[in-house]
């Protein structure tokens, strides 16, 4: 497999210099990918998302959803009810991203035990030298 990165253009901003880093920085944070994967189930309200994701705080979920909406992965629809009902849905861009991420998710599920075993067996160089 060969991966070719785009050349870096001096004087451009972070996102223009490296589109790979720009996208991965966003979806590689602690919560964004989990939010996107949860929305793969379909349109969800804020509280449904929070319940499905679990340990995320209300503030962090709101911030994550705003960022995903700003980047075009998620759409937000406010229904004019009292209280307002807000729903989140993957956009076509978000769906196309998840189609590419799905093999990684499947790999992670299939290899999670092997990764955990490797972590447990790992000895830092200093500790190995002391043995």
Image (tube, rainbow, N blue to C red):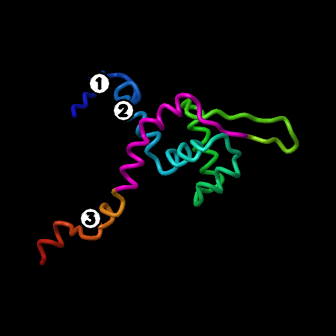
Indicate the quadrant containing the N terminus: top left, top right, bottom left or bottom right.
top left
Q: Position of residue 44 (x, y in %)?
A: 68, 44
Q: Which residue is mark 3?
A: 118
Q: Label 1, label 2: how many angstroms apart (C-alpha)?
A: 9 Å
Q: Which residue is mark 1?
A: 6
Task: Name the element at disc 3.
Answer: helix
Tell whether 103 sits left or right of 122. right
Q: Which residue is mark 2?
A: 20
Q: Quadrant of residue 18?
A: top left
Q: Position of residue 68 (x, y in %)?
A: 56, 37
**34 or 10: nearer the eye?**
34
Q: Which mark is residue 97?
A: none
Q: Earlier in the sequence, mark 3 or mark 1?
A: 1
Which segment did they paint magenta? 87-110
Q: Label 3, label 1: how many angstroms apart (C-alpha)?
A: 33 Å
Q: Label 3, label 2: how many angstroms apart (C-alpha)?
A: 28 Å
Task: Name the element at disc 1.
Answer: loop
Against 92, residue 67 (above or below) is below
């Amino acid at each position: 497999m060969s991966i070719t990165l785009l050349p870096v253009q001096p004087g451009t901003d972070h996102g223009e210099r490296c589109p790979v880093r720009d996208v991965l920085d966003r979806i590689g944070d602690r919560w964004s990918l989990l939010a996107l994967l949860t929305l793969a189930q379909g349109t969800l309200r804020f509280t449904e998302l929070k319940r499905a994701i679990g340990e995320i705080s209300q503030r962090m979920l709101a911030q994550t959803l705003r960022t995903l909406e700003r980047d075009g992965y998620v759409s937000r629809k406010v229904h004019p009810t009292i209280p307002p009902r807000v729903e989140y849905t993957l956009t076509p861009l978000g769906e196309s991203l998840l189609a590419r991420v799905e093999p990684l998710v499947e790999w992670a599920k299939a290899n999670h035990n092997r990764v955990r075993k490797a972590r447990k067996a790992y000895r830092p160089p200093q500790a190995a030298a002391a043995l």
